[in-house]
Amino acid sequence: MRDPFEDPSGEDPANLDFCDEHETVFWKGMSCEKCLEEEHRTDARSGMTWWNGLTERERAEWMARAGNTGVAADAWAEFKRAADQPTGDK
Ligand SMILES: [Zn+2]
């Protein structure tokens, strides 16, 4: 296995992918770091909006489901996880 964090410049272009938007190069099968960062920021914003729209009771519920870490992002992750598996699945 290649080290995905190794600097890929100078590698065989067949093994590399390119992000037009950020002009970054990365291993095929990986994702553009900057795209991921943006996704992460957008997601964090969505989480904040979600959290702010909850009642105290809902917050307590989701926080409990996330293991009472005291971190809103954990509750958000738990909410998304639950949303991914809508029925019956544990
Ligand atoms: Zn990108």
Image (tube, rainbow, N blue to C red):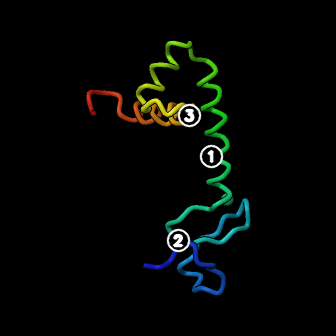
Q: Position of residue 14 (x, y in %)?
A: 54, 81
What is the C-alpha distance between the residues marked 3 and 1? 16 Å
| Numbered mark located on residue 71 in the image | 3
Is 43 placed left or right of 68 in the picture? right
Q: Amino acid at mark 2?
A: Lys
Q: Is residue 88 above or below residue 22?
A: above
Is residue 8 or residue 61 the one in the foreground? 61
Q: Position of residue 69 (x, y in %)?
A: 49, 34
* Circle 3 SS class: loop
Quadrant location, the C terminus = top left
Q: Are marks 3 and 1 in contact (CB under 8 Å)?
A: no
| Numbered mark located on residue 28 in the image | 2
Circle 1 packing at 10 Å, graded few (<14), some (14-19), many (20+), is few
Q: Amino acid at mark 1?
A: His
| Numbered mark located on residue 79 in the image | none
**Is ligand 1 closer than 8 angstroms to the Cβ of mark 3?**
no
Q: Amino acid at mark 3?
A: Val
Is residue 86 or residue 53 the one in the foreground? 53
> Which one is earlier in the sequence, the residue at label 2 or at label 3?
2
| Numbered mark located on residue 40 in the image | 1
Q: Give the residue at x 43% y 25%.
A: 64
Is 68 placed left or right of 39 in the picture? left
> Which one is earlier in the sequence, the residue at label 3 or at label 1?
1
Q: Give the residue at x 50% y 31%.
A: 75
